[in-house]
Image (cartoon, rainbow, N blue to C red):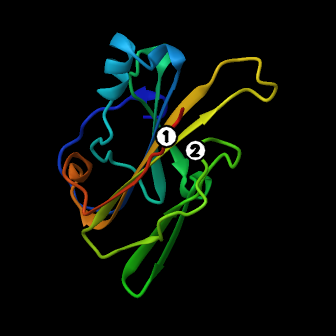
Amino acid sequence: MTGSRTASSPAHPARNAWWWIRTSWTKQSLGGEAATRRNAAPVGFTVPHAPPPVAHVVHMHERDGFDPYDSQEDLRKVDVQLSEADGRLRILPRVQPLFAIPPRPRRPPAVRLAPGQWVRWQLNYRFSSALGTRGWTYWLDTFNIAYGPVRDDVFLSTPTVFIDERGPLR
């Protein structure tokens, strides 16, 4: 379902599941009704049927009223370090872009998940155009990563581990 709106699917067991959700906005959505819509944007979706290893990617933009649009990416193109050893999955999102605000001089350590566990990891960014001629742009990246077996509604529940790397953007 590349480029389509997200849809729920019936429950099914999956080995591993990956969602990368990017919400982006400008100063127009920092307050009022637009901020209310942005803050109501979901941070979890059901896991669609797709052959692994695929990351499900959702983009929600201010210009689209924060409606979710999904696609699929090869896991190697997603900014997360993943490695499996000793029956656990090690996870550490990369910080991109390096010039964005807020600075992150110290980051949490990688998370190691046992089978059946999942992590929600959130990072936010603020940056301007290369020449500073346009206003600020803001991103919120949410990574939902499960180490199977898990059900397709796993990301609608409370995560086993929650890492909040959101920082001040002012």
Q: Tell me what residue is drawn at x 27 percent, y 44 percent.
A: 46
Q: Quadrant of the C terminus?
A: top right
Picture coordinates of residue 58, whole percent (x, y): 44, 36
Q: Earlier in the sequence, mark 2 or mark 1?
A: 2
Q: How many marks?
A: 2
Q: Say whether residue 133 is left or right of residue 126.
A: right
The mark found on residue 115 in the picture is: none
Picture coordinates of residue 52, whole percent (x, y): 44, 59
Quick check: 5 above or below 17? above
Q: Give the Cα separation between the discs numbered 2 and 1.
A: 6 Å
Q: Say whether residue 157 is left or right of residue 56.
A: left
Q: Say whether residue 111 is left or right of residue 114.
A: right
Residue situated in front as seen by the camera: 104 or 150? 104
Q: Residues within 10 Å of mark 1 (few under 14, many from 20)?
A: few
Q: Tell me what residue is drawn at x 25 percent, y 63 percent.
A: 160
Q: Can you identify the residue that label 1 sits on?
A: 168
Residue situated in front as seen by the camera: 31 or 58? 31
Q: Residues within 10 Å of mark 2 (few under 14, many from 20)?
A: some
Q: Tell me what residue is drawn at x 24 percent, y 37 percent.
A: 8
Q: Residue furthest right?
A: 131
Mark 1 lies on a secondary structure that is loop
Q: Amino acid at mark 2?
A: Pro
Q: Amino acid at mark 1?
A: Pro
Quick check: 122 above or below 83? above
Query: Do the CB atoms of the residues marked 2 and 1 lie less than 8 Å apart?
Result: yes
Picture coordinates of residue 23, whole percent (x, y): 46, 32
Q: Residue furthest bottom?
A: 86
Q: Can you identify the residue that label 2 sits on?
A: 102
Mark 2 lies on a secondary structure that is loop
Picture coordinates of residue 26, whole percent (x, y): 54, 20
Q: Say whether residue 37 is left or right of residue 69.
A: left
Q: Tell me what residue is drawn at x 79 percent, y 29 percent.
A: 130
